Amino acid sequence: MRRGFADASTMARMTASTALYAQRRARLASMLGEGGIAIIPTAPERLRNRDTDYLYRHDSYFYYLTGFTEPGACLVLAADGTSTLFCQPKDLEREIWDGYRLGPDAAVAALGVDAAQSSAQLESQLPRLLENRSRVWYPFAIHAGLAARVEGWLNQVRARVRYGALCPAQQDDLCTLLDEMRLVKDAHEQDIMRAASVISAGAHIRAMQCSARMLRDGQDVREYHLDAELQHEFRRHGSQAVAYNSIVAAGANACVLHYRADAAPVRAGELVLIDAGCELDGYASDITRTFPANGQFTGPQRALYDLVLASQEAAVAATRAGARFNDPHDATVAVLAQGMLDLGLLDKNKVGSAQDVIDSRAYFQFYMHRTGHWLGMDVHDCGSYVEPSELGQVSERRDPLSGEAIKNRPSRILRPGMVLTIEPGIYVRPAEGVPEAYWNTGIRIEDDAIVTDSGCELITRGVPVKADEIEALMRA
Ligand code: GLY
Ligand code: MN
Ligand code: MN
């Protein structure tokens, strides 16, 4: 069940980019401050039930600095750049049962760290590594129990202060440094994300075509049939896992934002919303497409679909270096607000103009999530959504729906290499005053964008978004 250096091709891929991880460690080390030291554990293995584990997934911060995917490892990085890796020791019996382990002896050359020791040494070595340092950094609120373990190691250092040892007097959240580094993706990361997007786009096409074909053949189509198509396409192209649990929502289920792929029937005449993306070499993709189960939009479906697409186009046009993270959302909302009035989802006699709809947040009945999020190793990737240079500029406003006072800080200024999703939607539940033709319709269109100087690169357009193009590929 474990993944590690399972085969020669994985090994080659890792070795090829050893220098990259060394550069990241050096950059981080330079920010730790005089006498600083950082502790970065990978993720634990997790039990699913009784003695069965969840598929193992490394910690993203740890992987970012090592490229190492085995469990049971921890990196210690000192401000002078010295790196020490603790990793699982070689153990023939465990390797017979669980798989290959790199082991500390091979780790130095394979990963380019300065030293490597068995993870069995971690508890005894950490106090020694922390001794005579001024501050210790580790990711806060990521690893259950880590803060207590750090306290325990520091207590062992404190027990030696009478012998002249210095104990770190400061603890800092390493995420504050790593989140900023991870927010801007380098060329290597962008390449992997493009490759992940190509696989995911192919999987969406496969699921769309499967739906149309099975319905044409008179088969009983279920959400899980389409989920199986996605999985098949992800895995056959080498994706290690899904980046998040796939949503395959037929008909009214599309109005449940966090729906999963379940067993509901996929019926001709209804829409299917699929939000699914693979993880490739530690990086996520995140695509949503909404399509008619049998390949033919009805009139009302098409009207809603084209509105969501127009709102996405506005968001894409607002995504470029120098713009704010909130700009695509505001552009989306402006288009949706006008469209909701035009289609009669909202009654202008009750809610007023499009600007009134925006100001009162009346659109929230049908569009209740944000238009995007950072994307990277984690599907909802790390990185502040507030512009760091403007943290002190706080304004206050009252939320029109809840009446709550909300403090606003200026939204993040986009820079080349940031990656975000653009994912507007409309979700129409049955309600008084809402035209019945739109009831139980949920539509979202989601693409992944790399910010560039002049705009953005949509890396997920291997699967079309235009209604006519979707219909054409479902006829194929
Ligand atoms: N698939 C998770 C999201 O779109 O945010
Ligand atoms: Mn998303
Ligand atoms: Mn998504």
Image (cartoon, rainbow, N blue to C red):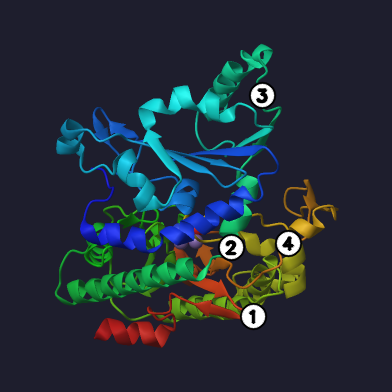
Q: Which mark is residue 167?
A: 3
> Mark 2 to mark 3: distance in Å?
52 Å
Q: Is mark 4 within 8 Å of ligand 2?
A: no
Q: Amino acid at mark 4?
A: Ser
Mark 2: amino acid: Tyr
State how far apart marks 4 and 2 are (Cα).
Answer: 20 Å
- The residue that mark 1 highlights is 453
Say which residue label 4 marks.
411
- Figure check: 234 above or below 474: above
Number of other residues with Cα within 10 Å of mark 4, as a class: few under 14, some 14 to 19, many 20 or more: some
Q: Considering only order in the chain, which callout, 2 or 4, is on the residue closer to the N terminus?
A: 2
Residue shown at the point (64%, 51%) measured from the top left: 30
Residue indicated by mark 2: 367
Q: Is residue 294 left or right of residue 112?
A: left
Q: CA distance from mark 1 to mark 4?
A: 18 Å
Q: In the rendered structure, which amino acid carries the disc numbered 3?
A: Cys
Q: Quadrant of residue 456?
A: bottom right
Image quadrant where one finds the C terminus: bottom left
Q: Give the camera-side residue of 380 and 303.
A: 380
Closer to viewer: mark 2 or mark 3: 3
